[in-house]
Image (cartoon, rainbow, N blue to C red):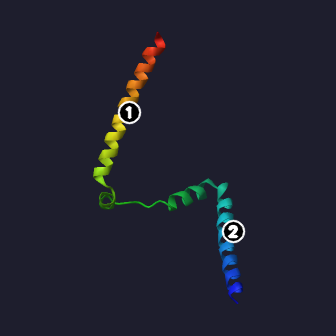
Amino acid sequence: MTDNKKSEKDSNAADSSADSVNEYLQTLGDEDAREQRYYSQEQPFSADEMTRLVNEDRLNELLAQSDAFLSSLSGELKDFDEDDSN
């Protein structure tokens, strides 16, 4: 009996996956349906939620690291241009 229940559960999962794939394939040619499907997966956040979710200290640290990296990269590119002209 357990095997039958398991088999039935697997069959239902396969049907569900197949239905999802079939639905997706049908929307591939339809730009409006594809766009609607894409935007329906978005989750808009309010300013309060974003403030609560974002670690401001970590964000500032990452921004400082990216600024340092870009400055370093700019210096390397400038040096590369100077070396190339000789």
Looking at the picture, does residue 78 appear above or below residue 51?
above
Q: Residues within 10 Å of mark 2 (few under 14, many from 20)?
A: few
Q: What amino acid does circle 1 point to?
A: Leu
Q: 40 or 13, which is in the foreground?
A: 13
Q: Position of residue 79 (x, y in %)?
A: 41, 20
State which tag comes first along the sequence, 2 or 1: 2
Mark 2 against mark 1, which lies toward the viewer?
1
The residue that appears at 71% across and 80% down in the rendered structure is: 7
Looking at the picture, does residue 85 appear above or below residue 71?
above
Q: Provide the secondary structure element on which disc 2 rests.
A: helix
Q: State the residue position of label 2.
A: 18
Q: Position of residue 34 (x, y in %)?
A: 59, 56
Q: State the residue position of label 1.
A: 70
Q: Provide the secondary structure element on which disc 1 rests.
A: helix
**Left or right, residue 38 beside residue 23:** left
Q: Position of residue 81 (x, y in %)?
A: 45, 18
Looking at the picture, does residue 40 appear above or below residue 61?
below
Image-quadrant location for residue 17: bottom right
Image-quadrant location for residue 19: bottom right
Q: Position of residue 10 (x, y in %)?
A: 68, 76
